[in-house]
Image (spheres, rainbow, N blue to C red):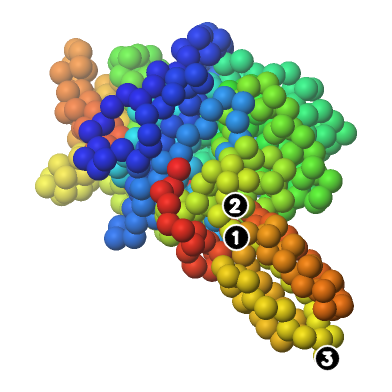
Amino acid sequence: MHPSAPPVLPPVTVEAAPAIAVRDLRRSYGDFEAVRGISVEVRPGEVLALLGVNGAGKTSALEVLEGLADAGSGTVRVLGMDPVTERARVRPHLGVLLQSSGLPGDLTVAETLRTWAGTLTAPRPVEEALTQVGLTGRADVRVRSLSGGERRRLDLALALLGRPGVVVLDEPTTGLDPESRRQVWALVQGLVADGAAVLLTTHHLEEAEELADRVAIMRGGQIVLSGTQAEIAETQPATIRFGLDEDAPRPPVPAGVQVVTDGRRVEWHTRALQPVLAGLLAWAAEHGVVLRTLLARAGSLEQAFLAVADGTDPRETPEENE
Amino acid sequence: MTATTPDRTTLDRPTSGPSRLSRVWSLASAETRMLGRNRTALVNSVVLPLLFVAAVPALGMDEGELPFGARLLVTAVGISLVMLTYYNLVTTYVARREDLVLQRMRTGELTDVEVLAGTAAPTVFVTLGQVVIIAAGVVLLGEWSAPADVVLPLVALLAGTLLMVVLAAASTSFTRTPESAQITTLPIIVVSTGLSGVFYPLSVLPEALGQIARFLPLTPVVELLQLGLAGQTWQGDPVDGSVWPHAGMPLAVLAGWLVVGSIAARRGFRWAPRR
């Protein structure tokens, strides 16, 4: 309620109030601080993907949002309410998919959904939920007999059964086959189109690229990088890669280019892709040199993620988070 | 510190929905259906306690002064509460916790207490059903005699059942797996039941030990049943007139255990396996 540390976020513009607002959240297990001061916001109709290797603190942070654990310090608000102390008021609006969760094996798929629906304020019809996750043909199968992917989709159907406006998905597609994964993505996109705020964690960069409006990359309990995908990609240098014939002359290295590998296979990193590439091509034309398997690529989200995972500072020019 | 106030109109939608009771009932009926589909659990919870109760008179363990009908009912309630309600619920809660089902339930709209109540429901139904069956059996055998007081046995049964649920929830904090419940439930099953007066009257114990036994969790339940059904004190003395003046101590002990058990359950209950 009274954070002594200065606020990390700039004042919020009130055009669309955040559905999820996390401010300087910290959480510890004994001496180990799993979440070390993170701040994020998710607005209605927006998907924020929280990326990070295992142990980065993603699940520990989500548990506070889900109302399952107290914040050590900092504030967490879902629709303006405290998800722990105002749990009863938050829950009808909150859909939660845990990273790993269990469902009783002795009930059928339809019974599981009906039971869950019976506990909710405004559930969607069970038939609709079955269709949503493609389990219509499996309605009368015991949960015990479902495949891992089917169980995950049933779990997702439960999370969405109460028509939540705020959805927290902890690794929603882990263990799913590619087709089911695309199905889940379409489902999430549908939710967002209807105005839901979605916070998801994932290991799959492809998933973040497909779904996320904004991305936050965590390491060691902190958000190291955050922004739109383009903004994050821009923190990374572009790559130019090419091969040279044995007798070919060496191109001069332009200013501001970092030489990653040299010799017959050359890799350059640069923050000025276009002029450097233009210079390289002009030099090659002038000297009649063939640049074999020439590749030029702007910085990418994947590159940023790997840089964070490796523990190298992904930002060559220091800048504030957010 | 309030940075923003979100649009509260989005919160207007679900104000009603089903009643709390109907929400818990949804979980309770699913749990009951699951019990019906689990043969082993069904035999354990329905057949075994009945056999056990039937064996008590046959084993000649009923040396007390109580009339046979009352004796059988007191035994039935005592055995059902411990072997069925308490033991079953420790294993059920732990199994649900280790299977991550409790954590899943906890992400929904049910409150923590509602999740625990819904999960306990089938066991409680079976417990109460057992007692009804035994009572009917007593009537059929022609051993039924009018109780000295109707309220006390009902209080003993219901408060005793609640106490077993609470103690089961508390016991999960030191029970890692459903299997280890066989060991962690021993203090209640062996010590508390053994010294409760279910198997033999407390009057056969040395006076000091008997007085100590009265403070164990199951003993007040047995005392209240004896008082209400047969009009006998814990020492086997018949009561003239109202039995209520003799009920103060066991009622207080029962209430005390409910408070202690609730606090222990609230503090110690874990919803997810240890990582």
- Which comes sooner in the sequence, label 2 or label 1? 2
Q: Are marks 2 and 3 on the same chain?
A: yes
On screen, residue B215 versus residue A294, left or right, reads left
Q: Chain of mark 3?
A: A
Quick check: marks 2 and 3 in contact, CB under 8 Å?
Answer: no
Residue at the location (38% across, 14% down)? B146
Q: Which residue is mark 2?
A: A234
Residue A242 seen in the current view: yes
Residue at the location (66% across, 46% down)? A208
- Which comes sooner in the sequence, label 2 or label 3? 2
- Name the mark nearer the viewer: 2 or 1: 1
User: Which quadrant of the view contains residue A322?
Assistant: top left
Q: Which residue is mark 1?
A: A271
- Name the mark nearer the viewer: 3 or 1: 3
Amino acid under disc 3: Asp
Q: Position of residue B86 (x, y in %)?
A: 43, 41
Helix, strand or loop for disc 3: loop
Q: Quick one: A135 or A109, which is closer to the camera?
A: A135
Q: Which residue is mark 3?
A: A247
Q: Mark 3 to mark 1: distance in Å?
A: 29 Å
User: Which quadrant of the view contains residue A97?
Assistant: top right
Q: Position of residue A288 (x, y in %)?
A: 87, 78
Q: Are marks 2 and 1 on the same chain?
A: yes
Helix, strand or loop for disc 1: loop
